[in-house]
Amino acid sequence: MLDLKRRRPDVRAYVASLEQWIIRTLAAFDVQGERREDRVGVWVRRRTRCWFEDKIAAIGVRLRRWVSFHGIAINVAPDLAHFAAIVPCG
């Protein structure tokens, strides 16, 4: 929890600073994270036959009277087997 009134009451700047913090943390593990101007989160590029991007970190923010409640999820090597039974769109 952070009091943004004491820092800078700007939600976009706050989210951008969280993204930058994640990017610096990933760099310590030799992972190159990137921001996207039109999306929230941190992305990594991977190459197979062409370039793909994967979302490695998601950010959720809620503010109440300029006090932040935030969550960050970093997806390094998730086990997606438990989603195998889900049928998209039906």
Image: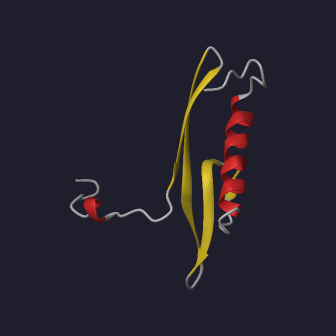
Scheme by which the image is coloured: secondary structure
Residue 15: give x, y in percent of width and height.
67, 38
84 with respect to 33 (left or right):
left
Q: Residue at x 71, y 34 (%)?
A: 14
Q: Quadrant of residue 59?
A: top right
Q: Position of residue 58 (x, y in %)?
A: 54, 48
Give the answer, above or below, for where 33 lies relative to 21. Answer: below
Left or right for 75, reference 33: left
Q: Report which quarter residue 79 is drawn in.
A: bottom left
Along the line of sight, the residue nearer the viewer: 33 or 3:
3
Residue drawn at x 69%, y 30% is 11
Picture coordinates of residue 83 (x, y %)?
28, 59
| Residue 35 visible (yes or no) | no
The residue at the far front in this view is 28
Is residue 27 shown above or below 66? below
Up-down relation of residue 11 to residue 57 (above or below): above
Q: Quadrant of the N terminus?
A: top right
Instruction: In the displayed orientation, state which residue is furthest to the bottom.
Output: 49
Report the label total: 0
Q: Position of residue 7 (x, y in %)?
A: 78, 24
Q: Residue at x 59, y 74 (%)?
A: 46
Q: Nearer the viewer, residue 31 or 88?
A: 31
Asked which quadrant contains residue 5, the reply is top right
User: Residue at horizontal 68%, vertical 21%?
Assistant: 3
Left-right relation of 20 to 53: right
Asked if residue 72 can be seen in this view, the reply is: yes
Q: Residue furthest top?
A: 65
